[in-house]
Image (cartoon, rainbow, N blue to C red):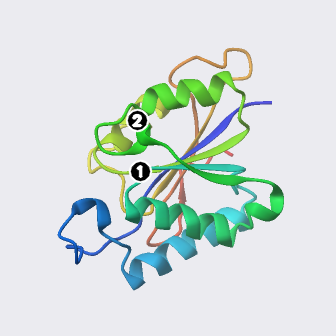
Amino acid sequence: MDVRLYIMRHGPAEDHAASGRDFDRALTSSGRDRVKDVARALLEADEAPHVILSSPLVRALQTAEIVASLTKLGERGGSVEVRRELEPGGDGPALVRECVAQEEKRVMLVGHEPALSGLAELLSGRRFPAGLQKAMVVGVATHKDEPSALPMRLRFVLEPKSLEWLDDSR
């Protein structure tokens, strides 16, 4: 079976945290709603992740937790794990290589721009000139005959505002 990866940018966040630290910026209420809508769309399309790996920054972790809650990840034996490779300046490609080597079946990576659009471009072979929108999900999968081949197979792009499935080849 192929490895499915879901690359998701965190939802819309406040401009400034009370602490003054970028690390602490939380999702706005409309950001939470957008993430909930995306999570529901993933669940309805049978695209719920089994594992969610998240940047440790508050807005990414909140995004991961909302997706986990609405897709009932815990009830399905899945988990949310914080990974430093997804924070700004982290090594996302190394994390992807690890997931593929471990044959994780459905892994969501939640992080930040501009690293995520670069990772999505590397994995999908598709350009994202405007970057990934907040709460956007790009779905890719390994090739059955050559799991480590790049680019991977682009399965879909879920546009977060309209919930339209673009480049849908699921």
Farthest-out residue, bottom:
29
Q: Describe residue 70's horizontal placement relative to residue 132 as left or right.
A: right
* As drawn, 80 above or below 135: above
In this rendered view, identify the residue nearer to me: 44 or 102. Answer: 102
Instruction: Name which residue type carries label 1.
Output: Gly
**Element carrying mark 2:** helix
| Residue in view at x 70 percent, y 57 percent | 48
Q: Would residue 125 be visible to someone looking at this image?
A: no
Q: Position of residue 34 (x, y in %)?
A: 47, 75
In the picture of the structure, the residue carrying the numbered disc 1 is 111
| Residue in view at x 30 percent, y 49 percent | 113
Q: Would residue 166 be visible to someone looking at this image?
A: yes
Q: Position of residue 11 (x, y in %)?
A: 41, 67
Marks 1 and 2 close (CB-CB < 8 Å): yes
Local packing at callout 1 (Cα closer than 10 Å; few below 14, some 14-19, many 20+) is: many
What whole-number distance in Å separates the C-alpha atoms at marks 1 and 2? Answer: 10 Å
In the picture of the structure, the residue carrying the numbered disc 2 is 119
* As drawn, 20 above or below 50: below
Instruction: Name which residue type carries label 2.
Output: Leu
Q: Describe residue 94's horizontal placement relative to residue 26 as left or right.
A: right
* As drawn, 166 above or below 58: above
Image quadrant holding the N terminus, namely top right
**Element carrying mark 1:** strand
| Residue in view at x 22 percent, y 78 percent | 18
In this rendered view, identify the residue nearer to me: 146 or 67. Answer: 67
Which of the labelled discs sits on residue 132, or is there none? none
In this rendered view, identify the residue nearer to me: 45 or 33. Answer: 33
Local packing at callout 2 (Cα closer than 10 Å; few below 14, some 14-19, many 20+) is: some
Q: Describe residue 65's horizontal placement relative to residue 29 as left or right.
A: right
Which mark lies nearer to you, 1 or 2? 1
